[in-house]
Image (spheres, grey):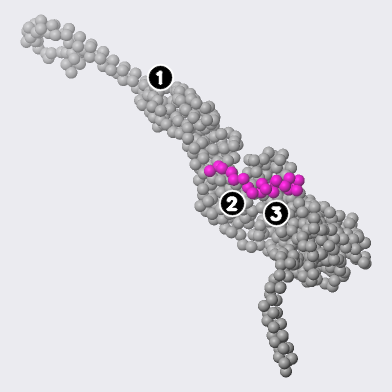
Amino acid sequence: MRALVYRIIAALSLLMVTVFTSPTSARAQDSLDPVASQIDPTLELVGSSTWISPDDDIRLQLTHTTIDTAVLRARLHGSVLDRSGFNAALADEFGDVREHFGPVEINTDGPTRFRMNPQAKLPEGVYPVVVELVAGSRVLAELTTFVVSTDRDESMHGLLAMLSDPDVPIAHQPDGSVVIPEVNELIELGEDAAALSFNITGDTTSALATTRDVDNIASSVGEVLTSTFVEVETEAWLDAGADAQLAVQLAEGRRAITEATGVPPAPIWVGHPSDTARSIRWLSDRDIDGFVLRESNLEPLATIDGETTMTGPFLIETPGTDAVGIAIDEQLASRLDESDPFLAAQILVADMAVMMLDSGSDEFGFIIEAPTTNLVPAVLDAVDSSPFLDVSSVGSLVHEVPLMQTSIDSALPLARRLDPRPASPIGSLPTTILFAQDAISSFGEILGERTGLVLELETKVAVGSAAELSEIESDAYFNAVYAGIESATTGIEGPMNQTITLTARTQTVPYTIENDLGYQANVLLVFESDALEFPDGAAVEQTLARGSNELHVRVHARSAGDAVLQITVRSPDGTHQLAASRVRVRSSVFSGLGVIISVVALAVLLLWWAREILRSRKRKVRAPAQKTGDTDDNDEASDADGPEMTTPEETADAE
């Protein structure tokens, strides 16, 4: 009995010791375990043999958290057969394990090299390789990469084009300032950036040209695709009947790109989701011969599942044209993870290899949106190390890779139909653009050449048309155009307080116009007057030099007296008034009819005066004779038997 009590007491004591000492012991053990002290163990791939021949070894180089008790081990899974299998492997859904490798002790002084020698020859295919950082029975970190096994390094050939389509804000501001675009960071990549195809607007390239010389940009950006000056929806402009304005927008984009890079842009267009067959046809008529599209903007093909990539160019169903399109592979771009650039590039190459091996074709073309600056060098290195891949420009890919066929057994080229979304209406924008263009054209005729000021105004009109601007933001650009023209044409003054006296019926008279614009100006002088005529025409083209300009106009006075001559200075097309003034013209010269009337009136007046003088003299002579002859006449009259007789002259005088 006593022994039983002792046993019970001993068991209780042991239990108490275990309860109170086990946590402390565990904590002490953990504190001594370097693995448990690691918060976030890491494992990163920094080198690998992405492509091998079937008899080659697999070589990996990895960096990792340094843990004395940790080792590396790996397993090789069976080959993935298609894109679906590749996506499953990325989601940790692997096939059977083909072979295990390791463990390999880690290198505490730097990266660890892991060489795997498969026991059997690897058939052609793409094989997932899972690498684990292990301490004891615990997996601290792992990663999945792929190795391509093939001997078709010469017959199998693929081109990868990386399209840089940066979303940068508008560079040219309404006040004339320029914001340097963020794409400048991509250009800093130098030779690596030259491997990219840039889809940047004329606005962006011309802004880059403010900080870099042409040779520098041309050697840095590589291929630049055709673009309008700012981003616009082609279909929306065609809906609005703004073909002419759209053509100007395209021409300005091409001009700016050519001037900034020193070479014309490649005739490749990056499509908009609203593009229709009409848009494609309109652009094709303007020398665009290749179109980059998104798979989401194309009608899906029943023969192709959602995980299969279109590995080459195809025809776009556009009646009347043979437009060639190529789709951006959005799944390929999703492989590019910035956290591990080298591994992301290896997965990208393996994904392309899966599609190339699965398709059975020998020529391939892939296009992805270019990754960030950190990933571009890694992708280029991975492609360069793969003998079946080369980096290409988008233009070369479109023109060098054969058109896809409707099936393996058919020689007919594949044709795909667009699936556009509705275009956004642009309202009265075309009319606003037209008025501004007319104003600039009129101003340009004043200058006589397309100067920097005209280009600046044209740039404001082009930028004000951008689809991304609100109505208020757009109006700011157009208002700046009119304000700029007004400011540039304020400085011409006509003759002030000038009076001219005509000394002849037709005479050339002088007048003075001041030109304080700072440049010579081509103008149209318009003359108006109610009392004057202009034998050489009422409108005369004239070039005004800077400063004072003494000019002459030939006038013909209709009558004597004062007249007002109005002189208006207008743009050569007559639409824009620059100045207006009045000149008083005083004429004392008679006209021909006036002279005749005056002469006749003077002759009549002289004749009347002459007759009056003669009558006055006759009356004076006859008066004395009448006084002396009155008595005799009376006597004779009394003796006479008949009436008194008078002469005609006397009768006239009496009357």
Give coordinates of residue 280: x percent, y percent: 69, 56
358 is higher (above) or lower (below) than 270? below
In the image, which is nearer the foreground, mark 1 or mark 2?
A: 2
Left or right: 575 in relation to 230: left
Tell me which amino acid carries mark 2.
Answer: Ala
Asked if residue 248 lies left or right of residue 311, the reply is left
Asked where in the image residue 258 lies, by quadrant, the reply is top right
Q: Residue at x 91, y 60 (%)?
A: 56
Q: Which residue is mark 3?
A: 372
Q: Earlier in the sequence, mark 1 or mark 2?
A: 2
Which numbered marker is on residue 466? 2
Q: SS class of the residue under badge 2? A: loop
Q: Position of residue 450 (x, y in %)?
A: 60, 36
| Figure quadrant of the N terminus | bottom right
Q: How many angstroms separate mark 3 from mark 1 (CA)?
A: 83 Å
Q: Position of residue 342 (x, y in %)?
A: 77, 57
Q: Where residue 650 appears, x then y in whole percent?
A: 18, 13
Residue carrying label 1: 503
Which numbered disc, 2 or 3, marks the residue closer to the eye? 3
Q: Which of these two is toward me, 372 or 450?
A: 372
Q: Name the residue nearer the viewer: 619 or 344.
A: 344
> Which residues lie in the magenta part?
175-194
Separation of residues labelled 2 and 3 (CA atoms): 26 Å
Q: Main secondary structure of the magenta part?
A: loop
Q: Is residue 598 above or below residue 210?
A: above
**Residue occupying image coordinates x 26% and y 16%:** 608
Q: Label 1 is placed on what type of residue?
A: Thr
Disc 3 secondary structure class: loop
Mark 1 or mark 3, which is nearer the start of the sequence? 3
Residue drawn at point x = 71 percent, y = 55 percent: 371
